[in-house]
Image: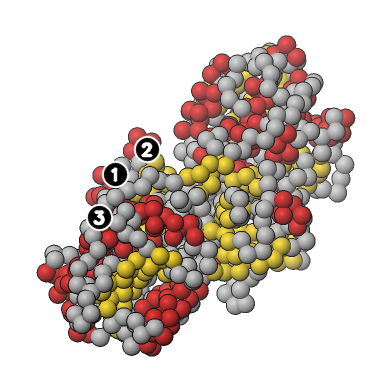
Amino acid sequence: MNRRFRYGPYFVAFMSIIQASALCLAQQAKPLAVPGNLGQDLADYVAIPAIPGYEGELVAKLRAELSALKPVTDNLGDVVVTIGDGAPRRLIVTPIDEPGFVVSQIMDDGYLRVQRLPQSGLPPAFNDLYAAQPVRVQAAGGKWIDGVTAGLSVHLQPGRVNPPKSSDLENLYVDVGANSAAEARKAGVDHLSAVAIHRRLGNLNDEFVAGASVGDRFGAAALVEVLRQADPSKIHGTLIAAFVVQQWAGARGLQRILSTIQADEMIYVGRLLPGGRVAGAENIHRAPRRDPGTGVLLGLEKTDGTPTGLAAELKQMAEANKIPFAVDYSADFIAPGYFPAPPLPEKSAHIGIAASWPATPAEIISTTDLAGLVSLLEIYVQGERTPVIELGHPFENHVFSRPAVGASKAETVLPHTVEAYGVSGHEGPVRETVKRLLPPWAKPITDDDGNLILRLGTPPFGSGAPRILVVAHLDEIGFAVKSIAKDGRLELDWRGRGELNFFLGHPVLVHTETADRDAILELPNGWDEAKFEWQQTPEPAIRADAGARTPEEAEKLGIKVGDTITIPKAYRALLGTRAVGRSFDDRVGCSALIAAVWSLGAPLKDRDVTFVWSTSEEVGLVGAGKLAKRLAAEGREPDFVFAVDTFVSSDSPLESKRFADAQLGKGFVVRAIDNSNIVPRELVEKVLKLARANQIPAQFGVTGGGNDGAAFTRYGPVDVALGWPLRYSHSPAELVDTRDVDALSRIVAAIARSW
């Protein structure tokens, strides 16, 4: 069985107890009848995309949760709760929006072009971090549909002098699977549709949480928790809580609140912000530098002075209640705009918590810091904080597997193989998935190198039947832990290759012997500086943060040298017959072989056909190479090898159509020429003739990369490589057309029967 570990349905519920720390919040009577808990709130808020001006779904969520408090919403979307009356009038404000994009053009071929919101004020690497990523597009009626952003395929770049840069918005295209503008519009996509990255909130060592928009939502989660636990009898004067919109777009919601609500004092709760350049240092800018775990932070533009006014009062409250508290740099939370900003109340302060990798998909905050923030706000609101209670550990690891299927269509098998993890040299879960998906009559064996081998026929001696071997590889690209640093970070090596900017700054999974652990891949030094560019040679060090801060903590998590790391994966259907997932290379090939076995129905008579699911292809055709050598030594080398692997396609607006021009949806592809092999032209024609005879759509062409069949040719066999068109190869968002997958499985079955 394929064992894949996932957290339970309330995966981030640990936030409700803040991992049983000294600042853990209690379960108690809820005087204001606000439903939910802190952990689930944070998970829910992060799960809802809310780019500036498109916060409606999150606003509705907040209104529903705060309904007992009779919230008021203005025509921008700000949600305001008022408790009590009289003086003093105290205002607590927190933003709820996040950076993202809106559709600015729908192209004739169905691709979407976008404009960023906000249009400035983000880290220079922000656009890069969206390249080749799963995204969500808001369609008509508020429905979200899946899509991906286009990315360069690494196999097609050698020889290109000036490939498109993913940092340039001109090169950001969104692919929802549409073949035309009409298809995209029929699905409800239109100009101004919102686009946001697919998010996943990760748990790092039960102490940190990481994910896109977590730094934009912690304030909302904290403020809702304060309102949930508040006792109105202990609130003096008037308390006004405001959840404001369009903070990234000129703080418009906040400016509305300041212009319409009179307050004696105000606390702004949100991430601390970078500022301008340091004088005399062109590539260095002022920015908060505290790490998660520091405690509650007070944001000041001048950090060398003593806090005064409300800031000093908050500092005293924290110290009196032993809540960790520190001062750090923050720029003004109202950026300069077209008009002067409305004045702040005389007593104002900016507090938040530290965030690593801010405004990226790998942003990290500390659960203990968040608990401290809630406690400080509770003391400010009502003079005391919620009592402490330890509630234990909330996680449960669950085995995940799709139910077994029996079908001759590869697209029904594909979700199963895609969602199994198997970096080169660690293909066990994928191999077990393949075995589980084969029909009962198929009895494969596993050789000493991990290759899964299924003999489909044994012809009588002297029959003259050609020996045919069909091979697809089990492994996928990823990383492996090569060492654990003194600070607990994991130092990694590639297993296979890809564009680093598709992976750094994003969530990953560390596959240990006992469970999959959440982590993030750290960005290179200088990632947030104005002139940052991705370093190609020498390649920067690759480091992962799983929440451990010492090697001993990493060991307690079960992490050791040699463990593998991959991008979290899911098979997602797009419009029509398109689908997106990580590791279609070569799980499509694996699925095509499985479906072909089902289609054959039984062992073949008078045929000598072997199917192989090979290992470690991505690191040098290792499994196939060892099998080829062994078969040759035994005098059993095949006559023909059909290597089934990706035809990396230039069917993308980012790629040159000079070669690899196979179109999605037009059928399987004969890989006539790649970097490892040239198929004799007469055999290309023979495959195409067989396809026509069986009414299977087919293409042929030249692409990059190598294939497992090349490992056999030195011993005499001919390599006839087959594939299917794949967009955005070796990225987190590979894209296929399932009609091509079906065509591939059908040609494999036809070859097995009659070649």
For badge 3, the amino acid type reads Ser
Read off the residue under disc 1. Answer: 187
Sequence-earlier tag: 1 or 3: 1
Read off the residue under disc 3. Answer: 408
Which residue lies at the image location 53% right of the left edge and 41% below the top edge? 398
* Alpha-carbon span between mark 2 and mark 3: 33 Å
* Quadrant of residue 97 within the rendered picture: top right
- How busy is the neighbourhood of tag 1: few (under 14 within 10 Å), some, or many (20 plus)? some
Read off the residue under disc 2. Answer: 143
Q: Nearer the viewer, mark 2 or mark 3?
A: 3
The reply to whether discs 2 and 3 touch (Cβ–Cβ < 8 Å) is: no
- How busy is the neighbourhood of tag 2: few (under 14 within 10 Å), some, or many (20 plus)? few
Q: Is residue 107 above or below residue 256?
A: below
Q: Position of residue 31 (x, y in %)?
A: 66, 14
> Does 343 sit left or right of 513 as displayed?
right
Q: Position of residue 35 (x, y in %)?
A: 57, 21
In depth, the one of 167 and 457 nearer the eye is 457
Sequence-earlier tag: 2 or 1: 2
For badge 1, the amino acid type reads Ala
Q: Is residue 144 above or below residue 30?
A: below
Q: Is residue 292 above or below residue 255?
A: below
